[in-house]
Image: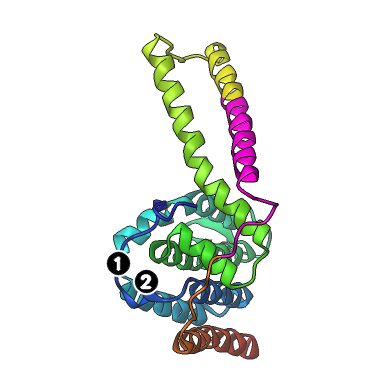
Amino acid sequence: MSAGHVHALYRHGHTPIHGMAPQVKIAISFGALVAIVSTPREAMWAFAIYGVGIAIVAAVAGVTPGYALRRLSVEVPFLILAAMLPIFGGSPTVEILGVDLSIAGMWDAWNIVAKATLGLLIATILGATTDVTQLLSGLDGLRMPTVVTAIAGFMVRYLDVISGDWTRMRIAMASRGHDPRWFTQIGPYARTVGVVFLRTYERGERIYLAMASRGYAGRMPEATQPATPAIQWIVGIGFVGAFWLVATTAWWLR
């Protein structure tokens, strides 16, 4: 993988969060997400504490509210679905502004919105402070199977290549007068997709042969992992432990 490949979510910076080892950030994110998902939906105070903790980390990482809100736009379809739950939920209901809303539906909607939003914020911070190369290195550091990280690396790299091919072919079609305004004109696009698929298959075969000629035997060479400072693991365990303490307390007070 090219070290210069940077995904759209990454924001270059020199914050303490940027400087943490990627395997520590991945472990923290996963542990915090599991704690959030495990929290009973009735414990609204617990989600408020999670939000404050995540906001503090975002501020330290240089992730501004505007940037986070733009990334949360992918959540809109789920918010629309959640908004429908109180309307079509079952009994018992409560009247709000002249509309009968399901109590269970409102709890379900809150559960989806709270957990999805907090989870996306954690993913946004991780993506903003860790580029693709570091993420793959962190997965290696967490002893993920090499084949998994290799496939993920190739996928990220060649999705951009395929996207570039598709964009160039669309421009070529438009320059030759193709203007698909009706469904009956979809044929050229369908044939273009087939050509892109064939090119992708042929490129994959050429890349494999080139790698095999250079000694590739089904396993990528392992990169040297620098030692992770113990203080980073201590901070990570403390952060995740605080989230789990809140989740445990929420269940105990339920």
Q: Position of residue 181 (x, y in %)?
A: 45, 15
Q: How many marks?
A: 2
| 118 or 252, nearer to the observer | 118
Q: Taken as a whole, is the magenta stretch helix, strand or loop?
A: helix
Look at the numbered disc 2 and give the secondary structure of its residue: helix
From what the image shows, is residue 203 above or below residue 222? above
Quadrant assignment for the C terminus: bottom right
Quadrant of the rendered structure where residue 126 is?
Answer: bottom left
Q: Position of residue 180 (x, y in %)?
A: 46, 15
In terms of sequence position, does the residue under pointer 1 or pointer 2 come before the other?
1
In the shown orientation, is residue 131 left or right of residue 94? left
Q: CA distance from mark 1 to mark 2?
A: 6 Å
In the shown orientation, is residue 174 left or right of residue 211? left
Query: Tag 1: Cα neighbours inside 10 Å, few (<14), some, or many (≥20)?
Result: some
Mark 1 sits on what residue?
13
Give yes or no for residue 242 being in the magenta stretch. no
Mark 2 sits on what residue?
18
Name the residue located 40 percent from the left edge and 9 percent from the top edge.
176
Q: Position of residue 44 (x, y in %)?
A: 51, 78
Q: Which residues are magenta?
A: 196-222
Look at the numbered disc 1 and give the secondary structure of its residue: loop
Name the residue located 51 percent from the left edge and 81 percent from the top edge.
46
From what the image shows, is residue 248 above or below residue 37? below
Q: Amino acid at mark 1?
A: Gly
